[in-house]
Image (cartoon, coloured by chain):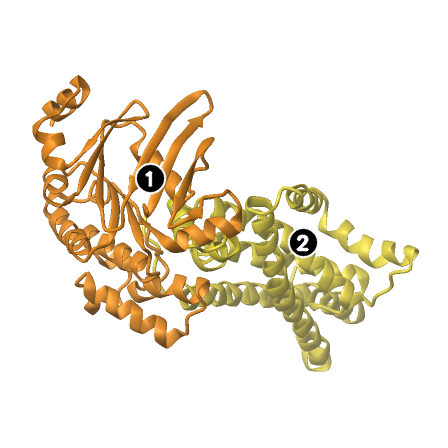
Amino acid sequence: MAYHFDFSWIPDYSGVILKGLAITVELTVVGGLVGLTLGTFCAWGRALGPNWLKPIVGAYVELIRNTPFMIQLFFIFFGLPSIGVHMNELLAANIAMVINLGAYSAEIIRAGIQATPRGQFEAGASLAMSPIQTFRHVILFPSLQRIWPALSSQVIIVMLGSAVVSQIAAEDLTFASNFIQSRTFRAFEAYLLTTVVYLALAVLLRAAMRGIGVIIFPRRRRA
Amino acid sequence: MSLIEITEVRKAFGDNEVLKGINLDVQPGEVIAIIGKSGSGKSTLLRCINGLETINAGSIAVAGAQLLPDELHLRALRLKVGMIFQQFNLFPHLTVGGNVMVSQTVVKKTGKAEAETMARKMLDRVGLGHKFDAYPDELSGGQQQRVAIARALAMEPIALLCDEITSALDPELVQEVLAVVRELAAEGMTLIMVTHEMKFARDVCSRVVFMHQGRVHEIGPPEEVFSNPQTAELKQFLGML
């Protein structure tokens, strides 16, 4: 059977595609920045924080890591309005991305913190630093450096997972491709294009994470 | 008045009592060597003095400040007593200069320029002024340990605790570190060092403490302790070397 490729629809839908791309990028950047910040705080809380905080952070992390992302998203967007918390689909998508990456990255960063030699904590303490100061100035950066490749992968996983937000009509890249194929019936081409764009995004994101690593960790890790 | 007063200090890890009532007074400017077999409690005693281990009984005071296990007292005490470790414990993500500056800017809130001046001065003192921009992993063990000394000195402590500071070094690097310590002693710094360098202890120290099974077994000027040991345990220990 001969299939005739038809990409002639692209000019008509370039606006939809670009908007979808912009939203996927926005979700990834905001989710990445805020999510990793939340993850760092939770990693600190679970590894080094006060005893009352550990079970709270633990409960959050396990709740998120043991439930589907789509259900988390639906709960925020469809569930919360029942108790009077309303938000638009983009905000709901952003919040879902942040709490999801926050939980997963917390466990990755915690591994980095707990691999720190005890002598580093003791050196900070012996210089009269408080535990928080020691964490901030001594422990944090080498810990992040240790797990940076794993953290980079997690950010990419979350970026790809953002496709799910199309289910609450957030107009991301996946939403755009669904929209296009329903209008043009060119499913093969529409999803092929989307696949290529996601692939390019993932490759770029990985390179960006590597570049950020080079900038914030001036020292290559040894052993 | 003694600079450091250690009174009836006891420390146990679980059922294992490591320090069984230690008394030791250190005068300003004294250089004390703590010697003894491994497991005799000498490192634990040193770690208790700046609160890295909490004591179970007794008291420790440095220049009148009591060692109490709360954050405020601990930090006040640690500002007076610096510590140097066997494994150097330099911060790998900071340059040599950054290592010496970080506690000044973070703890004392010293301005950056002032902290840098102090850092350069202390690095010159240990002969490493030219390594200011190097990273720790670019230095030899002896150089790293000298940076650790400069880092401790930059906080202007009144006493330094040295926990086997040459034990992790290759033999040919030991002397450059000891030379720095020797200079500090000559300048009147109060030093308490756990060491296996008996010749150094003999040359530099004002008193030698021999610890055995969690107690101060013998104490005295080096010539007495080394030339005329009173107890069988010390004789045996010195005989092993």
- At mark 1, the secondary structure is helix
At label 2, the amino acid type is: Asn
Of marks 1 and 2, the one in the foreground: 1
Q: Residue at x 63, y 59 (%)?
A: A35
Using the rendered image of the protein, determine whether residue B147 is visible from the camera's viewpoint.
yes
Pointers 1 and 2 in contact (CB under 8 A)?
no
Would you call the spot at circle 1 few (<14 residues within 10 Å), some (14-19), or many (20 or more)? many
Q: Is residue B117 left or right of residue A207?
A: left
* Shade representing chain A: yellow
Q: Residue at x 72, y 51 (%)?
A: A69
**Camera-side residue: B218 or A173?**
B218
Measure the alpha-carbon separation of dots 1 and 2. Answer: 46 Å
Q: Residue furthest left?
A: B227
Q: Is residue A89 left or right of residue A52?
A: right
Where in the figure is residue A169, as x and y percent of width and height? 80, 65
The numbered dot on residue A100 is 2
* Shade representing chain B: orange
The correct choice, above or below, for B85 with respect to B219 in the image is: below
- Residue bearing mark 1: B46
Q: Residue at x 45, y 56 (%)?
A: A129
Q: Which of the 4 quarters of the picture holds residue A164?
A: bottom right
**Camera-side residue: A172 or A219?**
A219
The N terminus of chain A sits in image quarter: bottom right
The numbered dot on residue A61 is none
Using the rendered image of the protein, determine whether residue B128 is visible from the camera's viewpoint.
no
Where in the figure is residue B234, as x and y percent of width and height? 17, 23
Q: Is residue B155 left or right of residue A102?
A: left
At label 1, the amino acid type is: Leu
Where in the figure is residue A50, as x and y percent of width and height? 61, 45
